[in-house]
Image (cartoon, grey):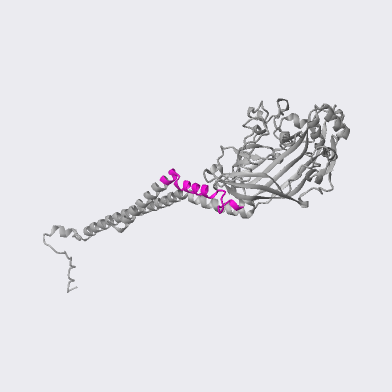
């Protein structure tokens, strides 16, 4: 066997081995499973893990934008006209989030923490000065007091004696961070549980929502970041069914790795006093990082007729609102506060049509999360929610006599975050390693294909050289035969044919005549 033949056999054997091995490993997903198991072990909420420090102090900047609805025709509304509003904003604040008093509990299988938030105003990102700009809106303290006093002659008479304003005007700063309300101040003199100060964000700057206990994800990666208890409770007490009172999912700051498009993402949010869910919408890309976009479907805030599972969120059978709204008065001290998406996005048309100046748009009013499916990291998010007040006729309060039931928008927020460049670079590096390891069998198959091409080239060249050798041998043989034929005896003239002797016939010329 020649050296060339040995090389061909070696290349062929190696090629077959690589192809079979690569295809077998790819079919078994061996390296992919190895990488996924590594991710499951590293993405856990324990000291020293890859994600623990960033979970405690998230590096990407978070911005909170406040948009207010200025009521422009209060007097006409009181006379029966449609309420008109004008959106004013944003008033933007940089939001700093960090977890305090972090400690491992229950034999290091859970982690306890307090989510602290603080806000710093950003004038360059805002439309005006919150300390100067005035907003006319629903007087929420007055409506809260009237709702508590309705049905009681003595209480309603006392409240009327103190004087109530259905609508009021305050600065943006006061509406957000608090002002001393006249009616609440009067009531606090006789009731110690009444607080004098009211603000939509009162006591939420530099404070927390209470203790959370989270699953670390060590036992099951699907539980990574999932809330076990809030304020010591594993279930809520605000609603009328066990399903509605369930605390499901994470707090919105962490999601398990290896997401798929078919699952629902659950988030527990104290602001809404309930858990909500999101579903996959589309593939997106942020700073070169692939992501799945999850967004709340219409069914989350659907009416009980449209989604029977939501019946537990009805405060009472008579206080069950339509699609797109959630009355959160049980966790807002009885105030007639209603939550929705901005401009009543995804709500029934009747709520939009009742207010002049609203225009729900998916681009500006949709809540969504863009999550990298491999790591579960948030690469971009927009949390958008609106605070409304239910204005209606209340027994015992003559000022409300001519009012129709109307959901009046007060303010909506846009809490947004985009992954920072340093974090994006780390995620990209991790994804590159993950892809290389997961696709290593394809690299093996690729090498096998290259060797297959080399084998084909070697076989073609060997075939050509063999054909060339045969052609040369044939040519030499043919040349030798021709040479023999050329050197065989041949008579020079016809006379030789007639002479029996051997030799060459030489014709001599006659001698010249001497005489001549």
* Quarter of the figure with residue 514: bottom left
Quadrant the C terminus occupies: bottom left
Residue 188, position as x, y percentages in the image: 82, 39
Please tell me which residue is depicted at 54% across the width and 42% down the height of the picture: 222
Q: Position of residue 324 (x, y in %)?
A: 70, 32
Q: Is 467 on the left-hand or right-hand side of 381?
A: left
Prevailing SS of the magenta stretch:
helix
Comparing 197 with 456, the one in front is 197
Question: Residue 390 magenta-drawn?
Answer: no
Of all residues shown, which one is farthest toward the left?
500
Classify the position of the N terminus by image quarter: bottom left
Name the one closer to the observer, 452 or 17: 17
Spot occupied by residue 31 in the image (x, y as percentages of width and height): 46, 48
Tell me where the magenta segment starts and ends, as one range.
24-53
Work out whether residue 207 or residue 340 is closer to the camera in this orientation and state it. 207
Tally the numbered discs: 0
Is 130 rendered above or below residue 485?
Answer: above
Q: In the shown orientation, is residue 64 left or right of residue 458?
A: right
Q: Is residue 35 magenta?
A: yes
Name which residue lies at 52% across and 43% down: 220
Q: Quadrant of residue 181?
A: top right
Residue 152 makes an appearance in the image: yes
Residue 81 visible to an observer of this rendering: no
Choose between 82 and 38: the one closer to the eye.
38
User: In the figure, is residue 319 to the left or right of 264?
Assistant: right
| Rendered position, 58 above or below 413 | below
Q: Tell me residue 404's x, y (percent).
A: 81, 27
């Amino acid at each position: 066997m020649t050296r060339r033949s040995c090389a061909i056999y070696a290349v062929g054997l190696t090629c077959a081995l690589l192809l079979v091995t690569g295809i077998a490993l790819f079919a078994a997903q061996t390296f992919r499973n190895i990488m996924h198991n590594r991710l499951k072990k590293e993405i856990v909420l324990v000291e020293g893990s890859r994600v623990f420090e960033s979970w405690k102090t998230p590096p990407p900047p978070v911005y909170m934008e406040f948009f207010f609805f200025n009521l422009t025709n209060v007097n006409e509304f009181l006379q029966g006209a449609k309420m008109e509003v004008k959106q004013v904003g944003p008033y933007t604040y940089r939001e700093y989030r960090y977890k305090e008093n972090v400690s491992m509990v229950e034999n290091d299988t859970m982690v306890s923490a307090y989510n602290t938030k603080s806000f710093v105003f950003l004038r360059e990102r805002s439309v005006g000065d919150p300390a100067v700009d005035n907003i006319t809106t629903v007087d929420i303290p007055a409506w809260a007091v009237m709702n508590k006093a309705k049905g009681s002659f003595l209480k309603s008479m006392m409240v009327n004696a103190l004087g109530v304003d259905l609508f009021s005007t305050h600065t943006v700063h006061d509406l957000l961070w608090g002002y001393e309300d006249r009616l609440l101040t009067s009531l606090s003199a006789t009731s110690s549980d009444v607080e004098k100060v009211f603000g939509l964000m009162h006591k939420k700057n530099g404070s927390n929502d209470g203790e959370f206990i989270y699953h670390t994800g060590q036992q099951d990666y699907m539980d990574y970041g999932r809330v076990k208890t809030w304020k010591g409770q594993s279930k809520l007490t605000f609603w009328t069914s066990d399903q509605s009172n369930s605390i499901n999912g994470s707090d919105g700051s962490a999601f398990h790795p290896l997401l798929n498009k078919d699952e629902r993402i659950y988030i527990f949010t104290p602001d809404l006093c309930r858990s909500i869910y999101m579903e996959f919408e589309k593939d997106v890309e942020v700073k070169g990082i692939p992501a799945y976009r999850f967004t709340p479907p219409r069914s989350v805030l659907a009416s009980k007729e449209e989604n029977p599972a939501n019946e537990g969120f009805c405060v009472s059978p008579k206080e069950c609102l339509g699609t797109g709204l959630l009355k959160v008065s049980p966790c807002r001290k009885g105030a007639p506060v209603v939550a929705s998406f901005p401009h009543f996005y995804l709500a029934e048309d009747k709520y939009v049509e009742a207010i002049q100046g609203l225009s729900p748009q998916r681009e500006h009013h949709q809540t969504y999360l863009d999550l990298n499916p491999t790591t579960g990291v948030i690469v971009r998010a927009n949390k958008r929610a609106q605070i409304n007040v239910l204005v209606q006729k209340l027994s015992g309060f003559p000022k409300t006599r001519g009012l129709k039931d109307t959901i009046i928008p007060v303010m909506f927020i846009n809490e947004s975050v985009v992954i920072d460049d340093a974090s994006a670079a780390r995620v990209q590096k991790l994804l590159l390693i993950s892809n290389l390891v997961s696709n290593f069998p394809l690299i093996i198959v690729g090498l096998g294909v290259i060797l297959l091409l080399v084998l084909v080239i070697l076989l073609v060249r060997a075939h050509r050289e063999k054909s060339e050798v045969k052609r040369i041998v044939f040519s030499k043989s043919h040349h030798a035969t021709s040479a023999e034929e050329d050197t065989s005896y041949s008579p020079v003239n016809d006379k030789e044919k007639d002479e029996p002797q051997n030799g060459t016939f030489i014709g001599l010329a006659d001698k010249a005549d001497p005489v001549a």
